[in-house]
Image (cartoon, helix red, strand yellow):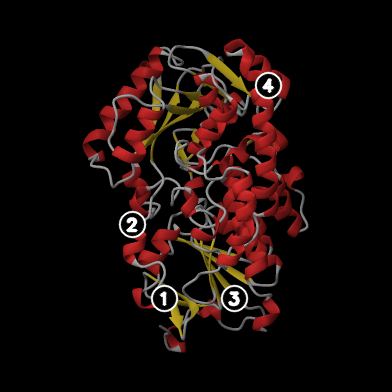
Amino acid sequence: MTLPASQVSEHTSGRSKPHAVVIGSGFGGLAAAIRLGARGYQVTVLERLDAPGGRAYVHKIDGFTFDAGPTIITAPFLLDDLWGLCGRSFSEEIDIRLMDPFYRIRFDDGKVFDYNGDADAVKAQIAKFSPRDVAGYDRFMEHSQAIFKIGFEQLGHVPFNSWTDMLKIVPDMITLGSHRSVYAMVSKYIKDPYIRQVLSFHPLLIGGNPFSVTSIYTLISFLERKWGVHSAIGGTGALVKGMVSLIEGQGGTIRYGAEVEQILVKDGTATGVRLKSGEAIAAPVVVSNADAAWTYRYLLPTEHRSHWTDQKIDRAQYSNGLFVWYFGTKRQYPEVAHHTILLGPRYKGLLDDIFKNKRLAKDFSLYLHRPTATDPGLAPEGCDTFYVLAPVPHLKGDIDWEKQAEPYRARIAKYLSETVLPGLEDEIVASLVTTPRDFQDRLLSYNGAGFSLEPILLQSAWFRPHNASEEVNGLYLVGAGTHPGAGVPGVLSSARVLDTVVPDASTYA
C-alpha cells in the first residue's frame, strides 16, 4: 500500500541520502541504525515507548535506577565495532567492569558455586563437588570451543537466506552433536548433578530449555571464558544512551511515541511504514526490531505473507515468559554478588512445568541482580538496587497474572528473606512488577515470550525468520526472533548481518 505524496511525512522528502526506517529501539534496532548510518543511509528509528531500549528500557523510581532487561554484557568487541564505525572510542565513553564471579550459583540446599572465566578456579570449585568431573570439564570446554568457532565466529554474522546455506553446515553440526540438547551434551562429560546444572543453565539466559535447545548453545560457556561477563557503570541503560548518541551523531533521528501500524508494500517490495497516527513514512529500506512473530502477524498484511502465515506463527514454539520484580532497599546487602543464580529444589521438573506443562509451579529458580555491588550510584546512598527474575510460562499457559502476580511476588520475597536477603520484606522502599502480560502489551512480544521464538534446532539458523525477509524485498529483521538469536551478542550480531544483506546506499542514489 502507498499513500499520495501529499500524505507522506515531510521528513521523508528532500534527502540527499536514501532513507532507512528502523522499527524499535532495542539493542538490535539501535545497532542496525548505526550500521546503516555508517553505510550512507539517512536513518529514522521509530519507538512506540517514551524512551529507547526496548527490553533494555530503564525504570527510575524514587532515586533507584533499574535496568529492565539485559544486564549481562559479553563479547564487548561488538560494541567496540559500533563506536569505531562512528569514529569514536567505546572504552573512552563507556566504563564496563569485568565481573568476578560471573555468577554466584546457590543451590536449594545452600551449597554455593562461584563461576568465572578462570579455568583453574572453576576446576577447584568442581573438585569440591565432584573430583572425577574435573577432567570432564576440560573436555566439555574443548567441545564448547569447537562449537564456538563454528557457531559464533563463522556463522553468527552470516545470513541463512537459502536452504543450501543450511546444508553446508550440516556435516559440522553432525560432528559436533548439534542434535543433542545442551543438558545432554553437558551430561556426556559431567556426572555430578550439581555441576550439570552449573554448566547447562545458560540457555535460560536466552529463553531456551536446557533439556530441549540444541547443544549449539553450549558455545556460551567458551564465549564467556574468552571475553568475560561485564556490567556497565550507569547500568545497561548507559549503553543504550551511548548508542543513541552515536545515531544522533550520524545525523539520524529517533522518534518516541511513534507506533508503527503497518509495513507498506508495493509490487512485492517494502516502501515504508504507516504509523498509528496515520502518518506514512517512505523508505526503500525497512528494518524491524519489533518481535519477529509480531512483525509478521500484525505489521505485514496477510496478502504479503506466504511463508510466515498466521497458522505457522501460532504453531511455532516460543521461549518462556518472565516474571521480573524490581525493588530497592533502604539498607545494603554487601555479601550478595552482582549476579546470583538461585536454583530451586527441582531442575528438569520445573523446566517441564514452564516450557511443556505451562503452569505456574509452587517452586522457582531465580536470577537475582544487584548492580549496586559494582555501581553504588544506581541507588540512593546507603541503599541497594535489585531485580529478581523468575522464568515462567508464556501466555499460552492458563495463568491469570492480574490475580497471581502479587501472591507470586510475595512468595519470592519470603524466599529471598529466608535465604540471601535477610529481613527483606521490611527493607523495601521501591517496587515494580512486570509479567508476561506486560511483555505482550507493552513490548509487543508475541505470547508474552521473553525472548521470542525458542531456540530449538528446527527454529535456529535457516529455520528462524531470516534477516532478509522471505516475504517482501526491502524488509529486514533484527533482534531476538531472527538469526542468530536472543541475548545481547545475538541481537548485535543480527544487525551485523545487515552489512551483508542490505544493499549499499548508492543503490538508491
Gap in Å between the C-alphas at discs 1 and 4?
62 Å
Which badge, 1 or 4, is on the more N-terminal residue? 4
Residue corresponding to mark 3: 19
Q: Residues within 10 Å of mark 3 (few under 14, many from 20)?
A: many
Q: Is residue 496 above or below residue 486?
A: below
Question: Marks 2 and 1: which is nearer the front?
Answer: 2
Gap in Å between the C-alphas at discs 2 and 1?
33 Å
Which badge, 2 or 3, is on the more N-terminal residue? 3
Question: Marks 2 and 3: which is nearer the front?
Answer: 2
Residue 135 circle label: 4
Residue 315 circle label: 2
Q: Are marks 2 and 1 in contact (CB under 8 Å)?
A: no
Amino acid type, residue under disc 2 in the picture = Arg
Q: Secondary structure at mark 2?
A: helix
Q: Is residue 381 visible?
A: no
Residue 279 circle label: 1
Where does the image place residue 103, in percent across and percent down from the top left?
58, 26
